[in-house]
């Protein structure tokens, strides 16, 4: 198993090498320039559109419902566990590069949402199918269908073997065990040298059962559940982090300085023995940032395509807010909590892993008892990860539907396999789970980024046309 993990790690290092990191940032920078840094001066308008439905829009769910479905998939273990693992591997400077990637990622997510609506298909029953596979096929031309299919295959695998199932349920069961049985005393069974407690077994079965009930109901049930859970979980976690930061406000300036310095001179700040370089900080920060907000992956536009709208730009703006909430706000809160409490040191020396790092930060920084802190984080992580499982089921099913069309038996078989992956997820190691997820994320990002680069002119033209009409409309009023 150790040898297999090493092979996976080498593949991950190759996939997430400098070429992909540069490509992701380059596409984000290109789009930022072509849309005129829209992610800054149009953010207030985007927030307004997020909460207001468009009259006579075509689609399956409201703009807010589509956003919540997308956020249900993006706001997950990446915001709690992902930030911790990024800092553990890349130092506090990884958070800086995560924020840089998120800023340009807002432009990327805007373009994804715009193209998803522009090139989507709506059948006679009002069912919507859209996403990178369609803006590759219809925007770039039929000769690029092979690229669309490659994206669909990698995205489907990411859903069932990586970001959608295993990482999420693994994070949930780890948090439950950390709260109820931190010393793994109530052993249910062992696999080799690994011991699994009843807390892991019971929580894993419970999550699988609840997920199955929602997944079988399809998009509208997923959207309905997401619209209730997503705002609640985001606000609860945000309040916890704000209390932690205010309680430790005197340490905040030093934490910010450490994050920035570690981004550019990690060995000077953290010591040469750590072995962290600028490349490592960038690699882990960008990779975990993409894992968290999914800008450039091509997942969010699958949900965006279902929004009730006639304006591609409008839904692009709504999509853009997803990256803002996910990384600029929530991941920043997590990273600051870990750094200003000094918990990043226990993550970097390997003393703690995954959710345990953020749990330790909450215990060290919040003015509550350790049991209360651990309980709060467990609840947040359960909600975050559970909704991600739901959102990625929708994404991966749409990818499969693109490949096999409406073959209901195959689609139902996939649901069964997806639910089975949730069931076995708790029994895989953290390093294996996250490495596998990173590999599939990187592989599905490549065809999507190629499409965004090729269609950047379309994004620019649509943006210009919309805001000319928008100004004219406001003038007439």
Image (spheres, rainbow, N blue to C red):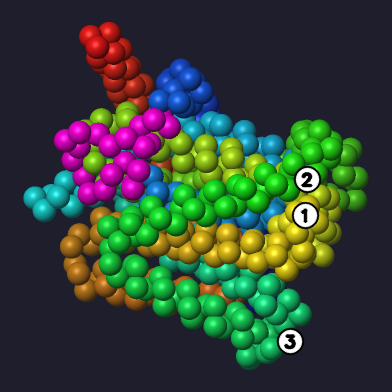
Secondary structure under tag 3 reads loop
Q: Earlier in the sequence, mark 1 or mark 2?
A: 2
Q: Nearer the viewer, residue 17 or 39?
A: 39
Circle number at residue 185: 3
Is residue 384 depicted above or below 275 in this figure?
Answer: below
Given contact means CB atoms under 8 Å apart, are the residues at marks 1 and 2 in contact? Answer: yes
Earlier-in-chain disc, 3 versus 1: 3
Disc 3 from disc 2: Cα separation: 34 Å
* Residue lying at 41% horizontally and 77% vertically, measured from the top left: 209
Query: Which dot, 3 or 1, sits closer to the camera?
Result: 1
Q: First in sequence: mark 3 or mark 2?
A: 3
The residue that label 1 is drawn on is 367
Query: In what element is the residue under mark 1?
Result: loop
Residue underneath mark 2: 247
Label 3: few (<14), some or many (≥20) within 10 Å? few
Magenta residue span: 46-66
């Amino acid at each position: 198993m150790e040898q297999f993990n090493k092979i996976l790690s080498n593949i991950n290092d190759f996939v997430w090498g400098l070429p992909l990191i540069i490509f992701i940032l380059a596409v984000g920078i290109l789009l930022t320039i072509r849309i005129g840094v829209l992610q800054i001066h149009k953010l207030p308008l985007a927030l307004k559109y997020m909460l207001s439905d468009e009259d006579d829009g075509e689609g399956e769910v409201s703009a807010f419902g589509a956003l919540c479905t997308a956020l249900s998939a993006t706001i997950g273990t990446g915001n709690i566990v992902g930030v911790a693992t990024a800092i553990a591997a890349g130092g506090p400077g990884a958070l800086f590069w995560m924020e840089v990637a998120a800023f340009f990622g807002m432009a990327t997510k805007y373009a994804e949402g715009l193209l998803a609506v522009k090139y989507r298909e709506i059948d006679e029953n009002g069912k919507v199918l859209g996403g990178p596979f369609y803006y590759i096929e219809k925007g770039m031309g039929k000769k690029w269908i092979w690229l669309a299919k490659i994206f669909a295959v990698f995205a489907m695998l990411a859903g069932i073997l990586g970001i959608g199932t295993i990482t999420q349920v693994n994070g949930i069961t780890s948090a439950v065990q950390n709260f109820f049985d931190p010393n793994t005393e109530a052993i249910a069974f062992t696999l080799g040298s690994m011991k699994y407690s009843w807390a892991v077994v019971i929580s894993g079965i419970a999550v699988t059962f609840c997920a199955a009930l929602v997944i079988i109901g399809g998009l509208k049930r997923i959207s309905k559940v997401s619209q209730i859970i997503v705002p609640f979980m985001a606000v609860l976690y945000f309040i916890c982090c704000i209390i932690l930061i205010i309680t430790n406000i005197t340490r905040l300036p030093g934490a910010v300085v450490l994050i920035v310095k570690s981004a550019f001179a990690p060995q000077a700040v953290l010591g040469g023995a750590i072995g962290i370089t600028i490349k490592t900080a960038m690699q882990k920060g960008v990779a975990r940032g993409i894992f968290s907000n999914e800008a450039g992956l091509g997942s969010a536009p699958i949900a965006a395509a279902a929004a009730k709208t006639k304006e591609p730009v409008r839904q692009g703006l709504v999509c853009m807010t997803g990256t803002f909430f996910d990384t600029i706000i929530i991941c920043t809160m997590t990273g600051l909590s870990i750094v200003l409490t000094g918990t990043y040191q226990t993550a970097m020396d390997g003393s703690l892993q995954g959710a345990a790092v953020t749990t330790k930060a909450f215990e060290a920084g919040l003015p509550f008892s350790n049991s209360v802190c651990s309980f709060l984080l467990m609840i947040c992580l359960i909600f975050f990860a559970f909704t991600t499982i739901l959102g990625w089921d929708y994404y991966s099913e749409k990818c499969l539907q693109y490949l096999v069309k409406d073959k209901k038996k195959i689609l139902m078989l996939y649901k069964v396999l997806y639910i089975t992956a949730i069931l076995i997820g708790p029994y895989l190691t953290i390093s294996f789970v996250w490495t596998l997820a990173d590999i599939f994320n990187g592989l599905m990002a490549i065809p999507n980024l190629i499409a965004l680069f090729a269609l950047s002119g379309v994004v620019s033209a649509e943006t210009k046309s919309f805001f000319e009409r928008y100004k004219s409309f406001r003038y007439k009023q």
